[in-house]
């Protein structure tokens, strides 16, 4: 395994980006645990909003939010209104809009193209140092070669779906 001193500038950049992503995810997980345990978070729900309630018996109920009380939550399902007891609720999630696949693909392409450009410039510099007569074309090839996989990765990363509003302790 290479030591950090032997990494190229583009390799170090990739390593730094990965470290930032992992640390941001870990920090978000620690912060959300304490904030999501408050029943008052459910006051942010609006009537008619799509929600999912997971009960202590691991049974899940999906429907439209109707009302909130100190003792439970009421939702409207195809079968009619149903009130679920607060003491039996493990988690309440709200459905967020679209998946944003196009936006994520563009972001992934931009990040990939930037990494490809950086790697291409580093490769051009290294090759030029070794053999000055060699043409510099890696900076032109790098962005599409790395940008296309970046777009594909961005398109498969889910951003929509269900987001927790409340979690029991």
Image (cartoon, rainbow, N blue to C red):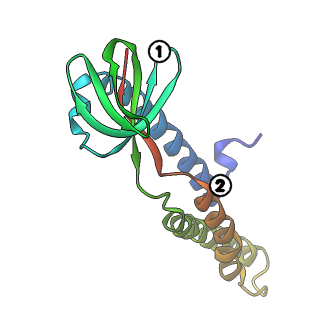
Q: Secondary structure at mark 2?
A: helix
**x and y percent of residue 105 in the render?**
56, 66
Residue farthest along the front direction in this orientation: 79
Residue beneath label 1, please? Answer: 56
Look at the picture and state if 125 lies above or below 84: below
Q: Residues within 10 Å of mark 1 (few under 14, many from 20)?
A: few
Look at the picture and state if 134 lies above or below 157: below
Residue occupying the point 71% across, 84% down: 136
**x and y percent of residue 60 in the render?**
50, 28
- Tag count in the figure? 2
Q: Secondary structure at mark 1?
A: loop
142 or 91: nearer the viewer: 91
Q: Earlier in the sequence, mark 1 or mark 2?
A: 2
124 or 119: nearer the viewer: 119
Residue beneath label 2, please? Answer: 11
Nearer the observer: mark 1 or 2; the answer is 1
Query: Is residue 128 found left or right of 28 in the rendered image?
Result: right
Quadrant of the rendering where the C terminus is positioned = top left
The answer to which quarter of the image holds residue 165 is: top left
Query: Is residue 62 found left or right of 75 in the rendered image?
Result: right
Q: Are marks 1 and 2 in contact (CB under 8 Å)?
A: no
């Amino acid at each position: 395994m290479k030591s950090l001193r032997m990494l190229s500038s583009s390799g170090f950049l990739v390593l730094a980006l990965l470290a930032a992503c992992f640390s941001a995810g870990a920090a978000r997980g620690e912060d959300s645990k304490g904030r999501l345990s408050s029943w008052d978070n459910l006051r942010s729900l609006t009537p008619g909003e799509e929600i999912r309630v997971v009960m202590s018996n691991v049974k899940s109920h999906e429907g439209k939010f109707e009302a909130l009380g100190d003792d439970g939550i009421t939702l409207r399902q195809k079968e009619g209104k149903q009130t679920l007891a607060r003491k039996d609720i493990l988690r309440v999630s709200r459905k967020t809009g679209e998946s944003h696949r196009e936006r994520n693909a563009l972001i992934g392409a931009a990040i990939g193209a930037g990494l490809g450009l950086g790697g291409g410039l580093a490769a051009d510099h290294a090759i030029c140092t070794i053999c000055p007569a060699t043409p510099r074309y890696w900076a032109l090839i790098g962005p599409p070669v790395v940008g296309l996989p970046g777009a594909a990765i961005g398109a498969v990363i889910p951003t929509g779906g269900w987001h927790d509003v409340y979690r029991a302790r």
